[in-house]
Amino acid sequence: MSLLELLGQGFVQHALIAAVLISIAAGIVGALVVVNRLVFMTGGIAHTAYGGVGTAIYLGLPVLPVTGVFTAGAALLLGALTRRKRERTDTLIGVIWAAGMALGLILVELTPGYQAGLMTYLFGSILTVATVDLWLMAGIDAVIVSLALYYYRDLLSFSFDPVYARTRGIPVTGLYFMLLLLVAETVVMMIQVVGLLLVIALLTLPPYLAQRYTRTLGGMMLLSGAFSLLFCLAGLYASYWFDIGSGPAIIATACAIYLVVVGGERLIGIARR
Amino acid sequence: MSTPETDQPAIVLDGVSFGFDREPILERIDLVIPRGAFAVIVGPNGGGKTTLLHLILGLYRPDAGTVRVFGDKPGRHPERIGYVPQHGNLAPGFPATVEQVVLMGLPHGRRHGPGFHADERARAQLALERTGIPELAQRPFGALSGGQRQRVLIARALITEPELLLLDEPFSNIDPYGRACIHETLDGLGGTLTRVMVSHDLGITRQAVSQVLAVNRWLVSGDGPAITEEMLGLMYGQHGADCPMGHSALNAHLAPSASSSHPGGEAR
């Protein structure tokens, strides 16, 4: 099949729209996660989301909305537990991480006759995104973009130095909870595409790369969104070319590009010496 | 209150005690810093100097007693207070220009949205000129030297043209040249600005200093720029038996004057 014929397929078009939509969220939220050093926290929220998936499957309810509510609750709980001592909280995050994951696995196992689809939420399948999910993702994007634009100045100050931001009257606690909720909803919308096991890679690799080439937080958000889209598109093509799953293909492509860029910079640095 | 606002001292602490998880950090602190003063807070690490600043900033609420800044509760007037936090725990690769860092000194207000306004940027430029580094405005903050960063953080504190400047260890991790520059910057501010500077370096006392406060759970305050024996006793006196200084002549000399002023004043 030629590339043009491929692009004519409905499911491919859906996949491309989904890639754009998750890249918008991944760029903004990923940049905030990286500069606030919340990568482990994001891992915790992502794995806890599995508890939401299990709950939805067990109760026979639609997965994305139930997981959205469940994960938001988990994010608020983690926020309340870690609000005071942000640095000494990895144990708590680890416990909730494991508990959410275990709950999901148990509930899925208890669901009679449920076999298929489990892997969908672990590794994602961007090629089966339904139209209704695209609308849901667009809605989450709209919320994320509006909040990030409106609170940009506060988020900048909060991310740079939260203690100082408090002395300026900035509502730091509110921003922290807002950020965790944005992480939760980003995780939920990305579950479908890359799967929750691989969410962290798409929320961290693009910002890590973007941080090397920008002087501002806004620039970092835009550039990591662009990197995320590049990874998704290149990954999708790799998935088609090598006939492998789309989720792992996207992440493998992202890691490969990251290594090439970072390794290339090192080599140039050595050569210049 | 019937007293006119302008007659209020800059800072008043009345019987303030504060601790974390039943561990007392500060006990029964009484303190008055008049307007225009240059007060230096000295004391050992862990003695409560930074905690005292945080109480004045309203970041902590006292367990007992009251804190008043310009006669009002702390935290009410961010634009009147400039704060230079202890330097060091800032993310090294943070994506922000010097100008943006200075703009973070503006109080939280009605202005939202992704950009900064021309009048705000002009104020940032003015603050950078006051600290002598206007040419660095568009440089990435992470690419600066320690001394340059510290001057950016002082500019951030000055952007609102505050009446009170709180500095927490502005000379830590800074090379001698950088120290000289910062001293020059601070001495040049003068005027009606009230300055409160935390330092664990006793050599910091300078001519411009009007008041020295020694803090080590309790507080001893002096009237002039000198550190008194009583302060030294509070800070370093009465060491435990495991400390070699506990048997030194200095300690034996200072202990009697120190023990009279602060009940149970063992060093922490």
Image (cartoon, coloured by chain):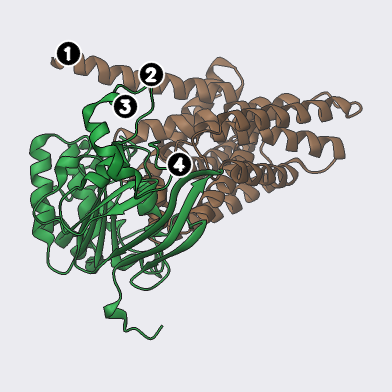
Q: Tell me the distance, in whole angstroms, between the alpha carbons under discs 4 and 2.
A: 19 Å
Residue A265 x/y as whole percent: 26, 21
Q: Amino acid at mark 3?
A: Gly
Q: Amino acid at mark 1?
A: Ala
Q: Residues within 10 Å of mark 4 (few under 14, many from 20)?
A: many
Q: Tell me the distance, in whole angstroms, between the alpha carbons under discs 1 and 4.
A: 32 Å
Whether residues under marks 3 and 4 lie with C-beta atoms below 8 angstroms apart, the answer is: no
Q: Residue at x 34, y 23 (%)?
A: B243
Q: Residues within 10 Å of mark 1 (few under 14, many from 20)?
A: few
Q: Is residue A5 above or below residue B116?
A: above
Going from N to C along the chain, the mark reached first, 4 or 2, is 4
Foreground mark, 2 or 3, reads 3
In this rendering, position of residue B23 left or right of residue B104? right
| Circle 2 residue | A259
Both marks 2 and 1 on one chain: yes
In the rendering, which numbered label is found on residue B181?
A: none
Q: Helix, strand, or loop for circle 2?
A: helix
| Circle 4 residue | A27
Q: Residue at x 31, y 17 (%)?
A: A263
Going from N to C along the chain, the mark reached first, 1 or 4, is 4
| Circle 1 residue | A271
Q: Amino acid at mark 4?
A: Gly
| Circle 3 residue | B246
Q: A234 and A159: which one is in front?
A: A159
Q: Residue at x 14, y 16 (%)?
A: A272
Residue A104 x/y as whole percent: 76, 30
Q: Colour of chain A?
A: brown
